[in-house]
Amino acid sequence: MTTTADSKLANRRRRLPLYPALIFTIILTQIPFLVTLGISLFHWNIMYPDETRFAWFENFQTVAADEAMRAAIKNSVMLTTGVVFFSTAFGLLLALLLDRKFRGRALLRILVITPFLITPVAAALIWKHIIFNPMYGIVNGFATQIYQKFGGDSVVVIDFISQRPLVAIAVPMIWQWTPFMMLIILAGLQSQPPDILEAAAVDGASSRQIFRSMTLPHLRQYIQLSIVLGTIYIIQSMDFVFTITQGGPGSDSTIIPYQIYLTLFRKYEFGEAAAAGVIVIILTIILSSFAFRLIRNLLETEK
C-alpha cells in the first residue's frame, strides 16, 4: 500500500525534470526585471556619471509629469486596444471561414498566415511606401481613379501618415496580427467535438443557435488567450512606429516603447527609461487583466 510519503516523493520525482526549465525562466525574466526596477530608483545619466545617486521614486514622478510620456501612454492604450479588438474580431471571422471544408482551403490558409510571417520592419516599409505614400501609394491611386470616374479632374492626395498617424500604424498592425489570432481561434474550433454539433443540428438547432450556445462558449479560453498574448506583444512593439512615423507628427503617434527608446538613446537617462519600462509592465498587466475579464464576462453573457 502506497503511503503519503511515497506519494509525495513520487510527485517530486515527476516534477524534477521541470526544475531546470523553471530556473532558466526565472533567470531569463525575473532577474532582468529586478535589475530594471533597481535602476529605476537611481538618477543615472550616462553623460554625467559623477552625478549618479539613489533617487527613490523621483524617476517615476518625472515620467508621470512628462507630457510626452503621458501622450505615449494614451497612444499606447488606444493603439493596443484597437489593434487587439479588430485583429481578434477579424481572426474569429477568418477562423470560422477556414474551419469549413471547401476547395482550395489549404492554399487560402497559407495565404492568410503569410502577413504574420513577414518581418515587422519589412511590413511597415511596404505599408509606408507602397500603400500609404501620398504621391504614388495604392490608396491614393485607387481613390484618384474612383474620383475621376465620377467626374473629378484632379488627383486625390490622402496623407494618412501625417494626418492620421495612429491609423497608419494600426491598420498594418491589424493586418499582421490577425493571422496570429486566427490560428489560436482556429485551433479551438478544430478541437470542438463534431459529434456534439451534429447531435445539436439533428435536434433542430439552427447554425446561429449552435454558434452562440456551443461554439462561442467553447472558444472562450482560446479568445482569452489570443487577447492576452496579443496585448502583451502589441503594447511592447515599436517596429511600425519607428519605421512609419517615428512618433510624429509631434508626439501624435509616440508610444511607450518608442518614448523609452528616445529617453535612453537620445537623453541617456537610464533611470527614467527604466522607470518607464516598469510602467510598461504594470500597464501590460492592467490591460491584459481588463481584456481577460471583459471577454470572460462577454462570453458568459452569451451562454
Image (cartoon, grey):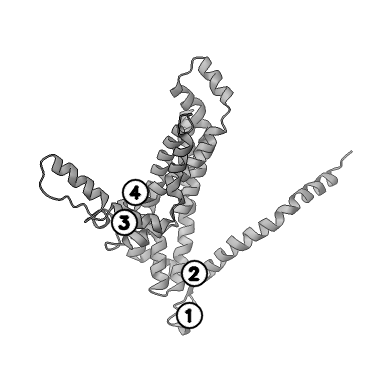
Q: Is residue 138 left or right of residue 119?
A: left
Categorize mark 4 by other alpha carbons within 10 Å: few (<14), some (14-19), many (20+).
some
Near-viewer residue (286 or 244): 244
Can you name the residue that lies furthest to the top here?
203
Q: Secondary structure at mark 2?
A: loop
Residue 150 in view in this figure = yes
Q: Secondary structure at mark 4?
A: helix
Real-space Cα separation, disc 1 to disc 2, in angstroms: 12 Å
- Residue found at the far bottom of this picture: 50
Height in image: 201 above or below 132? above
Residue 206 position, x and y percent, is 45, 19
Give me the C-alpha separation between circle 4 and circle 1.
42 Å
Identify the residue position indicated by label 1 in the image: 52
Q: Earlier in the sequence, mark 1 or mark 2?
A: 2
Q: Earlier in the sequence, mark 3 or mark 1?
A: 1
The circle drawn on residue 171 is 4
What is the three-letter code of the residue carrying label 3?
Lys
Q: Amino acid at mark 1?
A: Thr
Closer to the chain start, of discs 2 and 3, is 2
Query: In terms of depth relative to the viewer, which is nearer, 297 or 32?
Result: 32
Dot 3 or dot 4, earlier in sequence: 3
Q: Which mark is residue 128?
A: 3
Amino acid type of the residue that numbered disc 2 sits on in the rendered structure: Ser
Residue in the image at 62% along x and 58% along y:
25
Confirm or deny contact between disc 3 and disc 1 (CB under 8 A): no
Task: Say which quadrant the N terminus sits in.
Answer: top right
Dot 1: within a 10 Å radius of its alpha carbon, few (fewer than 14), some, or many (20 or more) residues? Answer: few
Which residue is labeled 2 in the image? 40
Report helix, strand or loop for mark 1: loop
